[in-house]
Amino acid sequence: MAHQRVYEVFARKSRGEPLHHIGNLNAPDDELARVYAYDTYDEEKWFDMYIVDRDHFHEVFNRGDADAAAAAASGLMMGG
Amino acid sequence: MGNENAATTRDAVRDLILVLADSKRLLGMRYAGWILGAPELEAGIAAASMAQDEWGHGRLLYALLKEFGDDIAHIEHDREPGEYASMDVLDEEPADWPGLVALNVLADGALSAQFEALRESRHTPLRQRVAKLLDEERFHAAHGAAWFRRLANGGAATRDALTAAVRGVLPGVVRWFGPDSERARTLTGEGIADTAGSALRARFLAGVAPLLEEIGIAADGEANFDGFDETRRRTDPAGPDAALIAQVRGDKNRVFLLD
């Protein structure tokens, strides 16, 4: 079987609402990930739903990360 | 003459609805059989979701039989296997996951092709239910196609298992659309379906041809109608396995079917 990827799933109840993270799943590719997201998470009446391959996430910062802490200390993190 | 035509059309519609309802009910059982034991957790969840859809569609279709004078409780809970009008290819439990994928693409796909032909049906109750049903079926088709490609490209053993499963199911599915008979002409002539028989079979085959090509199988339109019963759209009169039918009828816990 192909290499498994982790996909994060987002959805919202209405057009104006922000997207909520509702879970994740494992799938070998985008095509099956879409199907699995629908089958796993469409119990509620969502307005729309999206999947993102976790590898496509770009970290902006991580509060548990030493560099981010240093950046925050130097005043780069406004309003944090 | 007019009355006779009306009765012929009525019978054709009633039989078609039962064929679709019973096939959905049995297909639901086949998906349900893989809630446990699918190759990955998500595939098991997908099987559960598809089973749920099929049973929902089945129930919705059985309810349409009321206007034909059928007793729905009897239809759902009392019929013997020999009275079922489900697809022949759903009689056998798929031997392995590729077997289920073959049913997903071919049997579920054939049912959807039949529903597509009913989108503009003059039979209003049927037409009103087709769009929502087909909307849910999009995800069944996507599941089938994704798994089909995955297995077709997953190494020799996997590909061989898929090829064997497809060869096992395809002739029965191709036959299921039926001959270009009087009944097929009634369905199209009376505006119940936009196409039937060989034309509908050709439309279905054109849809699955790109997938079949991946494993080197030609989407061949030849069907053998020896022993084909047009009313039930089956060749084997015995129907599905008695134990399976007992299960779908809910025999074991019938006492708990409370009013």
Image: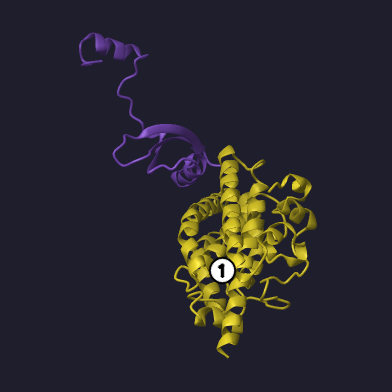
Chain colours: A purple, B yellow
Is any part of residue B6 visible from this angle?
Answer: yes
The chain containing the residue under callout 1 comes to: B
Position in image of residue B3 (x %, y %): 58, 86
Position in image of residue B118 (x %, y %): 49, 69
Q: Residue furthest front?
A: B259
Disc 1 residue type (three-letter)? Ala
Q: Which residue is mark 1?
A: B218
| Nearer-the-camera pick, B72 or B110 | B72
Q: Which quadrant would the N terminus of chain A be assigned to in this image? A: top right
Q: Quadrant of residue A69?
A: top left
Q: Residue at x 69, y 54 (%)?
A: B94
| Nearer-the-camera pick, B214 or B66 | B66
Q: Residue at x 49, y 52 (%)?
A: B139
Q: Residue at x 61, y 58 (%)?
A: B24
Residue A12 relative to residue B10: left or right:
left
Q: Which quadrant would the C terminus of chain A be assigned to in this image? A: top left
| Nearer-the-camera pick, B107 or B187 | B187
Position of residue B3 relative to residue B234, above or below, is below
| Nearer-the-camera pick, B140 or B220 | B140
